[in-house]
Each structure stands twice: as C-alpha cells, then as structure tokens.
Image (cartoon, rainbow, N blue to C red):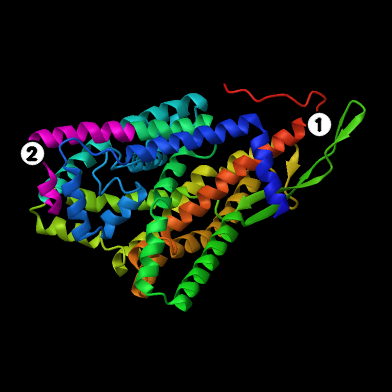
Amino acid sequence: MAGFTESIRNIWKIEELRERILYTLGLLVVYRLGSFVTIPGVDAATLADVNAQQGSSGIFGFLDMFVGGAFSQAGIFALGIMPYITASIIIQLMGAVVPYFQKLQREGEEGRRKITQLTRYGTVGITALQSIGYAIQLQYGATGSAIVIPSTLFTITTVIVLTSGTVFVMWLGERISEDGIGNGISLIIMIGIIAFLPQAVFQEVSLLNDNIFILLLEIGIWVLITAGIVLVSQGMRRIPVQYAKRVVGRKVYGGTTQYLPLRVNAAGVMPIIFAQSIMFIPSTVASFFPDSPMMQQIGTWFSDISGMGYSITFFFVVVFFTYFYTAIAVNPKEMADTMKRQGGFIPGIRPGKQTSEFIDTILTRITLPGSIFLGFVAILPAFAMQAGVSQGFATFFGGTSLLILVQVTLDTLQQIESHLLMRHYDGFMKSGKMRGRRV
C-alpha cells in the first residue's frame, strides 16, 4: 500500500504528467455536461416522466449506458462516439479487400492521415443516418408526447444537432489521445459506463431486500470475473530471440537472448467495442421502418440482449473481431523483417519467411483461447439476468461494460507507468529539471 501511495505522489510531482491528467479530466467533464443538454424541440420534463414510466431496457438501454444516459434523455450527445467506431470498422474492413485502402495502409504516416480523414467523413454520414432513425423513434414511440415542434422541423434539427454533437465528441477523443493520457475514444465510452455504476448497485441492493449473503456472493463472483479478465489481458507468450555477436570497433554487441512478447489478447478492448457497434446496426435499421412487421421482428430479436440468439451471435462476432483486430494490430512479417535486420533469430527457425510463419502460428494459437474467453465474458450478463440479477447490475457482472472498464483502466495505467519510468530515468541527469514538451 505504501508503494501505491508513493506512486500516486510521484504522478503529481511530474508537471507534464499532472497537466495531461488534468487536461483529460477536464475534457471528460465537458463531455458529461454535454450529455445533459437536450435536443431542441424536446420537452425535458415530459420526456423524463415517460422514461420513468416505461424504463429503459433491451438494446436501447444498453446503448444508453454507453453514452452515459444521453440516449434516453435526448441529449445532444445521444449517439456518443459509436458512429465513429462503426466508421472505423467499415474503413478497416475495406482495408482488407479494397486495393486503394491497402495502399493507404502501406504509405505510413501520410496514409494513416488520409485514413483518419476518411473515417471522419464516414462518421458524419453514419451519424446523419442514425440521427434520422433516432428522430423517428422519438416521434413515433412512447416519447412522442415530449416533441413540441413540427415533425419535419424536428427531424432536420435532430440530424444537425446530433451530427454536430458526435463530431464534437470525436474531437474530444482525439484531443485526449494527443494531449492527454490514455485512449480518448475508449475513455469517453468508459466514463459513460461508470456513470451508471452507482445507480446499478443501488438498484441491485434494493432488489435483494437486504439479503447480504446473496449480495456478497454476487460481489465475490464479480471479483473473480474481473481477476480473470485482468489475467487474460496481461497474459503473454514469450518467444526467445537470440542476437548474433557483432564487433563494432573495439566493442562486442549482441550475443544475448531476449524475448518477443505476444499477448493473449493483443487486440485489447477494440474487438468488444467493434462487436457491440455491429450489434447495434440491425435495430437501428429497423427503426427506419416502423410499419414493417419483418423489420420490427428483426429489431426486436437484436434488442433482446438476454436472448439465446442474441448471445450466440454476439459471442461469434466477438471471436471474429478479436482475430480480425489482432491481424491488424500485430504484423508477423514486419516483426520477422525487423528481427532479421537487427541480427536476431529464433533458435531452430530460419530468419525471414519461416520466422514470420512461426510467429503467425503462435499468435493464432494463443488468440484462440483469448477470443473464446472474451466472447464468453461478453455474454455473461445474459446468464446473470436469467439467474435473477437486475439488468442494470448484470451489465457490470461481465459483458462489454466490465471488459471495457478493465481494459481501458489497464491501458491508461500502463501509459501513466511509462511516463513515471521515463521521468525516473531523467532523474539521473545532473540538472534533474528537464521538462517534457508538447509538439
């Protein structure tokens, strides 16, 4: 405990790290405040009464949690950052099949800049489409009594406001990633989830009627699941790499054995976010056709997050995106080429193509149990609800919410730790006052 307290003190001693953390917290506060600003043309009091009567459940309740309650409150950030995630999925999928996007991926920094720009354009288009569906859902659903302006004007206003809101949230996420600490997009999603945690715990305690034993049992299982997620997230396979001796002048370099770490879950939290975004699409499309029985049936099927069909589909989508994002995030050929240039080799494996194939085989094998574990944890809320746990608390009992909370927290802590280590090395300099610069 003393070491943890010392680390906290060290964080605030480093000026650059302190400024980055405060900057991040400030932008997250801005995001949360914007979630309570209602779309023009909506009577907030009437909408609150309707929500209190019918509650929020199914896929819309799940989406509402991702945006911190802005969806049910008809806030200007009602769609949050999810359209950006959907656009990123589409662009990355096109990168696997469209030659133009494959070329951009190989162009280095300039290619990444173009891909980012195309993703932003895609975000605007997807948000505009989803805004139309959201406006229709507000007008023709139970919340229709809360709309106080004409239908056409409300639809146009909603599209403009929600699109602007999503673009602003996207900008906040990019600013956090650039000048703050952690991944801005993931932190924005996480802060929306955390906003629901106190309410979910209070609701579960009220439902149990002071049954302490059941509550402690649920908390114990929740801790075990969290520990399992941390274990899988931090687990890795270390491949030994031998470096040949090289004589440079009068010094001898190399001749040592190092290790190439391959993580069991190299993709991190992104497969879960991607999979959840994909699961939102059918219900969103169904909202465009309120008079179509078939589309409404599809929307209902994809809105029942506790249903067996939804859970099975979600499981396989998570497994697929774990492999897909791992293939994007980890490039065995690039690893093998870098190792060869530096004079390194894996004992018993020839440098070059065989090394690349060996790394790819190992990566495929260790990703399998990691993807299955992530898929299983992703559908745990369905089993928790079947066991009698309230829907609000069940979403934290496993599933996307807990995975995002754990993964984003670990990633942010690792970035903070890297800053601490860099400052520790700077402390050996005689000046001891070298400050980091923002570019």
Location of residue 196 by image quarter: bottom left
Q: Where is residue 409 in the image (x, y as percent from the top left)?
A: 54, 49
Question: Image height check: is 294 above or below 209?
Answer: above
Left or right: where 276 falls relative to 435: left
**Residue named by callout 1:** 428
Q: Position of residue 160 (x, y in %)?
A: 21, 31
Q: In which quarter of the image is the C terminus?
A: top right
Residue at the spot 72% in from the left edge and 52% down from the top edge: 2
Secondary structure of residue under mark 1: loop
Q: What stretch is highlighted in magenta?
A: 141-167
Mark 1–mark 2 Cα distance, whole angstroms, equals: 67 Å
Name which of mark 1 and mark 2 comes first in the sequence: 2
How many residues crowd mark 1 within 10 Å: few (<14), some (14–19), many (20+)? few
Left or right: where 186 falls relative to 87: right
The answer to whether residue 348 is seen in the rendering is yes
> For the residue marked with disc 2, what is the amino acid?
Ser
> For the residue marked with disc 1, what is the amino acid?
Phe
Q: Which of 109 and 16 is in front in this view?
A: 16
Residue at the spot 43% in from the left edge and 46% down from the top edge: 191
The answer to whether residue 358 is seen in the rendering is no
**Residue named by callout 2:** 151
Q: Position of residue 162 (x, y in %)?
A: 25, 36
| Magenta-colored stretch includes residue 166 | yes
Q: Nearer the viewer, residue 218 or 399?
A: 218
Label disc, if present, on residue 333 of the rendered structure: none
Q: Quadrant of the N terminus?
A: bottom right
Q: Which of 31 and 303 is in front in this view?
A: 31
